[in-house]
Amino acid sequence: MNQVISAGPFLYATVLEGTPDARFFSAPQCLSLLARFTLRAHVSVCRNKKSRSLPLVITTPDVRYPESNMCLVCGIPPVSEESPRNFFGKAFEQAAEKTGSKAELEFFDTNIIRLSVDDRSRFFDALISLLS
């Protein structure tokens, strides 16, 4: 993972395919922990105070099923948010319906989904418009 990018209403990071650590982060709970750590680290080193109030969306290739051409997407609320509620489950569901993306909402945590790599850019465009 190289950097955290501001995508308007949220921050965005990705674990690149072929990275040796990608296999560890293809487990949903590990990806969630990575997202929390990444957001806290970014907020602590970033000079922009606005980043403290932005949520983070992180993606990684789903190397557990390499033939499926899917990726995992995880969204976590901002560091400044005191409520334990996470709105990304509903936002992911609405963005997938709006774009007709091949998304699987099969995890216990609703803020984590499996998404087709081919639909990723359309999905994120819809997510940006939903959260703006």
Image (cartoon, rainbow, N blue to C red):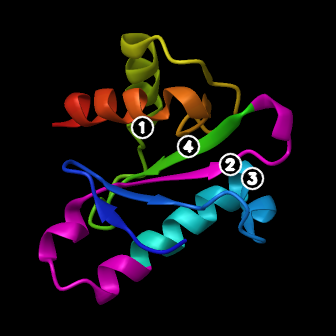
Q: Which residue is mark 4?
A: 73
Q: Are marks 2 and 3 in contact (CB under 8 Å)?
A: yes
Question: Spatial distance from mark 2 to mark 4, Cα to Cα?
Answer: 9 Å
Of labels 1 and 2, earlier in sequence is 2
Image quarter hosting the C terminus: top left
Q: Is residue 130 left or right of residue 69?
A: left
Q: Which residue is mark 1?
A: 88
Q: Residues within 10 Å of mark 2 (few under 14, many from 20)?
A: many
Residues 48 and 110: in front is 48
Mark in front: 2 vs 4: 2
Q: Are marks 1 and 4 in contact (CB under 8 Å)?
A: no
Q: Give the residue displayed 25% in from the left and 83% down from the top.
A: 46
Q: Which residue is mark 3?
A: 26
Question: Spatial distance from mark 1 to mark 3, Cα to Cα?
Answer: 19 Å
Within the magenta stretch, is there residue 42? yes
Q: Are marks 1 and 3 in contact (CB under 8 Å)?
A: no
**Amino acid found under the numbered disc labelled 3:** Ser
Q: Give the residue displayed 62% in from the left and 39% down from the top.
A: 109
